[in-house]
Image: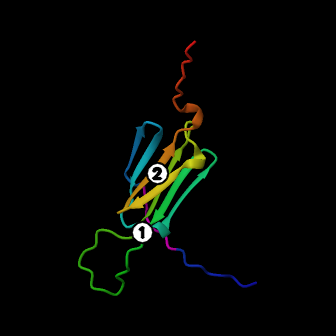
Amino acid sequence: MAEEIVKKEEYPKVQPFTDIIHKDDSYYIVMDLPGVSKDNLNISVEKDVLTIEATTNYPSFEGKNILRTEFGNVKYVRQFTLSDAVDREKIGANLKNGVLTLTLPKAEKLQPKKIEIQAA
């Protein structure tokens, strides 16, 4: 039986800076993900857990005469437990200039309901 040897890159795991905002009919998660492209970003919801995973893809400087380096590739990981207040089917994501904005609409049952008054 032949064994396969697979080289797996292990990047340091980093928890990205995050803001959570509540506005009108939605919640917003704004996350700082510098160096991340859409292709290296994975967002999933399984049961009540929202998971964001991303990796950077900076060029390698192997073989170069590096005088100083303060950053490199990392793996961003963040998880949130969702309540029933969030409509999981309508979650949206936008990545622009290294900032991820997730829109988590409130579930319909939690939306304010206006009662219409009938005139007699």
Q: Nearer the viewer, residue 32 or 22?
A: 22
In the rendered image, residue 97, in percent from the top left (x then y), is placed at: 35, 63
Say which of marks 1 and 2 sits in front: 2
Q: Which mark is residue 56?
A: 1
**From this viewpoint, which residue is outermost toward the front?**
120
| The N terminus, quarter of image | bottom right
Colour setup of the view: rainbow
Q: Left or right: 67 with respect to 21?
A: left
Q: Earlier in the sequence, mark 1 or mark 2?
A: 1
* Rendering quarter of residue 6: bottom right
User: Which span is picked out in magenta?
Assistant: 9-15
Say above or below: 97 vs 3. Answer: above
Disc 1 is placed on an element classified as loop
One can see residue 84 in this view:
no
Give the dominant element type of the magenta stretch: helix, strand or loop: loop
Q: Is the residue under label 2 in contact with that under label 1 (CB below 8 Å)? A: no
In the rendered image, residue 48, in percent from the top left (x then y), is placed at: 60, 44
One can see residue 74 in this view:
yes
Name the residue rendered at 40%, 70% in the picture.
Answer: 73
Whether 104 is among the magenta residues is no
Which amino acid type is shown beneath numbered disc 2?
Leu
Which amino acid type is shown beneath numbered disc 1?
Thr
Q: Which mark is residue 102?
A: 2
Disc 2 is placed on an element classified as strand
- Distance of mark 1 from mark 2, alpha carbons? 19 Å
Name the residue rendered at 58%, 12% in the picture.
Answer: 120
Whether 11 is among the magenta residues is yes
Q: Nearer the viewer, residue 101 or 111?
A: 111
